[in-house]
Image: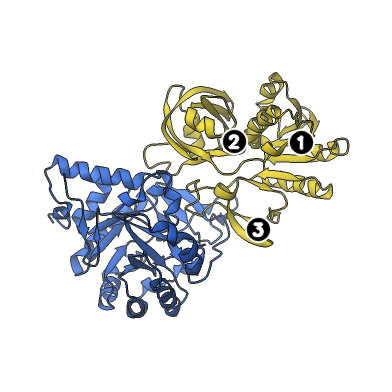
Amino acid sequence: MMIVDPRARIADKKGWGNYFLLSFESPRIASESCAGQFIMVRISAHPYPLLRRPFSIHSKDERHIEIFFKVAGTGTALLSQKKTGESVDILGPLGKGFSADTAVEGEEVAVVGGGRGIAPLYFLAQELRGRRVSPKIFYGGKSLEDIPLKEKFEREGFDVRFSTDDGSCGYKGFVSDFLHEELEKLSASRIFACGPEAMMKKIALAARVRNIPAEFSLESQMGCGFGVCWGCVKRIRKNGKAIWAKVCEEGPVFSGEDIIWPESEE
Amino acid sequence: MTDLSVDLGFIKLKNPVIASSGTFGYGLEFAPFFDLSKLGAFVVKGLYFSPCEGNPPPRLVETSSGLLNAIGLQGIGVQRFSEEILPKLRKFKTAIIVNICGQSDEEYASSIEFLDRQKGISAYELNISCPNLKRDGLCPALDPKATFSVVSLAKKRSSRPVITKLSPNVTDIIEVAISAQEAGTDAVSLVNTFLAMAVDVESRKPVLANVFGGLSGPAIKPIALRMVYQVANRLKIPVIGMGGITSGKDALEFLIAGARAVSVGTANLIDPEATLRIIEELERYCHERGIKRIEELIGSIKA
């Protein structure tokens, strides 16, 4: 059930450098949201920026949903300048999320986030915890300042470990390599991941080798977010056939078995 | 109460607001947002005879107040549309227009013959102007002769009214419009998107995998309006105006310039209820000025 909330009030805002958390008061969207789903945010009531921007839902409570983003262009820059108390037009919840609802108590689940790809995984960790599953969370970034949610995860008592490309926090190297090493010790029955495409592709390979089911939240440029423009497609295997599937409608979360990863460019 | 209905000759619409092809899915996607029966009409996403895979991504990029797309008409084809979608659309009390694409004149005609056997379609819109299918944006609407050929064949095979959607990517749009009229089209709709491109300065590659795409949205409105004005002045048949309409004021500009109806495209992607809002804004404008019939406004420009 998608809902247009033309006046969702910004209830809270936090920032760390280029990273921001915004909390919107929107009880109706909150009550319908599941981990892995996203909302479309209208940045301006005027024609620039023109399109809404997609954001994974980072967390929710009864009355609020939160988004987490990194300033990457004009849309996110303008959004980061909005103040607590302002109202924003949001549309959601949209898309298909993670299959957290099939997790069973005691199951060993690995949750892997790279950079701003951590956004939907906090909500996922909350949902898993609600099902008495304690996920092993891997949170990686380029450097310490790229893992701004470190304390938030720790404070909530999640089982979380960190990696940075430069070694300024936790494991030194890519989070995908970190996971790869840890998978030797873990008996993970499932992997959920979100992050840069190259990272997810590596994880997909590692999961396939070990025969571990994996789900990935894909990112794409979106025109509408609700299935009408066909702009956000990715290559997906469906009934044995490769098709261009809409990320907004059939995703953003896809099974690793179905994703046909693009060939790397360099 | 203002009478918002407009008469296109071959069909009477309850109001002049149409949802444009390619921005309204197959219609059903908007049913959760509002009652589709409130629309003057809607045009379903372009259909080839057979399902079409579309272009590889990236398929879209936002530009200043505009949307550049090269979707490539991904779609389910006329048969699946007729079986899976059309039965669900019939309950809506609005005009349903099917946008038809083709690689050849014969493909347009075959689709029309197939759809002519289905109930619940008010008219066809010939998409002879999509710029995203061949390199350099080639399409029949760039050439008056090619336009005449496809429109006359479509008219011959169709039992229903035919609207021809024109391209702005021409030197003289009037010439193409007259050609479509001579071939017997019941109306023209204009404009389709402008052939355009964007470059990624880091990779120095075109942003769109297709290199070129079609530009829509508020950025194109003044040019679209000029073309609608020019064509409406010269044709006997109705003109459906479109290009960057996002508000009642935008729609009024097209009506005053001579469009008998207006079509809303890109705005649907941003505000799913854009068409409804525009209908309300038109009604308010007329009410506040004591205009009893919106048709009084059509072509009322003082120029």
Chain letter of mark 2 equals A
* Residue located 81% across and 38% down the image: A188
Q: Which mark is residue A238?
A: 3
Can residue B132 be seen here? The reply is no
Q: Which circle's residue, 2 or 3, is located before the other in the chain?
A: 2
Callout 2 and callout 3 share a chain = yes
Mark number displayed over residue A34:
2
Figure colour of chain A: yellow
Chain ID at mark 3: A
Q: Residue most toward the right?
A: A185
Q: CA distance from mark 1 to mark 3?
A: 25 Å
Q: Amino acid at mark 1?
A: Ala
> Looking at the image, which residue sits at the far top?
A155
* Residue A214 occupies quadrant: top right
Which is nearer the eye, B81 or B221? B81
Can you say whether B152 is above or below A31 in the image? below
What color is chain B drawn in? blue
Residue ID for mark 1: A110
Q: Is residue A179 left or right of residue B32?
A: right
